[in-house]
């Protein structure tokens, strides 16, 4: 699903040939030490950008990246950059961007398809998440419009591939801990897990291809599959593989309630109910405008391990 916000001024593309006078283009990256941010930084450097990465924790030393310690929404100056990329919480970034002079730098910011998924949730806290995402998108759009800047908002589905995520890596961790994983028999809602490398590629494509307007794109993975099948592939990829137990709905409900009381998991009723719902999104606008070509879901055990200190993304 694509949303466009009109921008009254056009901004020039940074292009592929470096900045003015042959100088390297400069990018400010938030969340640079996270799974998507690290890959975005590596790709920017490979394309000749000079990168200033902002993170709460110190980042790995790497050629072409200068690290700035900071915590959103108060994370220092934003002027003097050709591009600003946010790979962290969108609501915090949106407040920084709205309140901090940043010129007409090209903006790419990650949000989430939770904006759609949780909007009508039975859980008030989930509805609040969706509302904050919607407000954050509108805040970024308004600030970019006022500055004559181009901005692209990217909404991933279930992110995997670097460990540490709160969806499939959590499934893998629970399965390893208990030696099995339990799902209801009707957990057949469609899912489109998306790899972090495909998201980083989309961010770079947005910087290189989209020079005007404010646009938003859903970024699903390249394959839609039933929730049960998605989890089964994760469990089969682990070493050793972990068994999936499929229970009748009523029995699963009792088991889930007991596990929650014992502290074995913290998934609420809305999360469990969504296993039965189709959460599928249209990648056609991103394919058209960004050349987006996400991979199918082929999990490997290392994709669900906690990130290792000193590791370098592709």
Image (cartoon, rainbow, N blue to C red):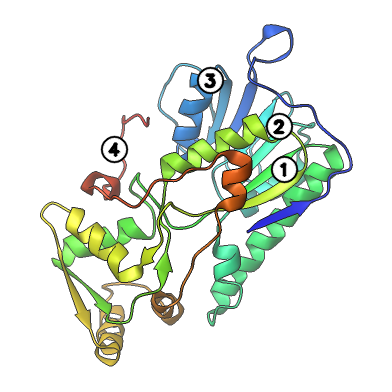
Pointers 4 and 2 in contact (CB under 8 A)?
A: no
The image quadrant where one finds the N terminus is: bottom right
Q: Position of residue 103 (x, y in %)?
A: 79, 31
- The residue closer to the viewer here, 106 or 51, is 106
Q: Is residue 190 visible?
A: yes
Pointers 3 and 4 in contact (CB under 8 A)?
A: no
Q: Pick whichever of labels 1 and 3 is earlier in the sequence.
A: 3
Pointers 3 and 2 in contact (CB under 8 A)?
A: no
Q: Pick whichever of labels 3 and 4 is earlier in the sequence.
A: 3
Q: Position of residue 67 (x, y in %)?
A: 52, 26
The residue at which mark 1 appears reads as 97
Residue 239 drawn above or below residue 18: below
Q: Position of residue 256 (x, y in %)?
A: 29, 82
**In terms of secondary structure, where does tag 3 sit?**
loop
Residue 71 drawn above or below residue 77: below
Pointers 4 and 1 in contact (CB under 8 A)?
A: no
Q: Is residue 173 visible?
A: no
Pointers 2 and 1 in contact (CB under 8 A)?
A: yes
CA–CA distance between discs 1 and 3? 25 Å
The residue at which mark 4 appears reads as 308
Numbered badge on residue 145: none
**In terms of secondary structure, where does tag 4 sit?**
loop
- Identity of the residue furthest to the top in this view: 21
CA–CA distance between discs 3 and 4? 25 Å
Q: Quadrant of residue 177?
A: bottom left
**In terms of secondary structure, where does tag 1 sit?**
helix
Q: Is residue 274 left or right of residue 305?
A: right
Q: Residue at x 63, y 14 (%)?
A: 24
The residue at which mark 2 appears reads as 78
């Amino acid at each position: 699903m694509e949303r466009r916000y009109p921008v009254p001024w056009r901004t020039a593309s940074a292009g592929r040939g470096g900045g003015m006078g042959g100088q390297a283009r400069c990018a400010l990256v938030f969340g640079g030490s996270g799974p998507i941010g690290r890959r975005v930084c590596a790709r920017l450097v490979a394309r000749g950008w000079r990168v200033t990465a902002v993170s709460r924790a110190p980042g790995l030393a790497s050629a072409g990246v200068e690290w700035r310690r900071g915590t959103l929404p108060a994370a220092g100056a934003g002027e003097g950059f050709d591009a600003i990329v946010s790979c962290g919480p969108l609501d915090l970034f949106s407040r920084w961007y709205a309140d901090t002079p940043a010129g007409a730098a090209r903006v790419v910011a990650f949000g989430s398809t939770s904006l759609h998924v949780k909007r009508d949730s039975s859980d008030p806290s989930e509805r609040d998440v969706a509302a904050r995402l919607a407000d954050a998108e509108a805040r970024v759009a308004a600030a970019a419009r006022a500055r004559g800047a181009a901005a692209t908002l990217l909404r991933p589905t279930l992110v995997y591939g670097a460990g540490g995520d709160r969806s499939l890596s959590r499934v893998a961790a629970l399965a390893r801990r208990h030696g099995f994983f339990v799902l209801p028999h009707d957990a057949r809602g469609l899912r489109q897990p998306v790899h972090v490398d495909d998201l980083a590629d989309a961010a770079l494509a947005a910087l290189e291809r989209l020079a005007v307007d404010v646009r938003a794109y859903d970024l699903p993975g390249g394959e839609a599959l039933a929730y049960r099948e998605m989890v089964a592939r994760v469990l089969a990829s682990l070493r050793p593989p972990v068994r999936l137990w499929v229970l009748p709905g009523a029995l699963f409900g009792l088991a889930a309630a007991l596990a929650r009381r014992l502290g074995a998991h913290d998934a609420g009723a809305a999360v469990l109910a969504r296993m039965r719902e189709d959460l599928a999104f249209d990648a056609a606008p991103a394919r058209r405008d960004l050349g987006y070509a996400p991979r199918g879901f082929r999990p490997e055990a290392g994709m669900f391990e906690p990130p290792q200190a000193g590791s370098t993304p592709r």
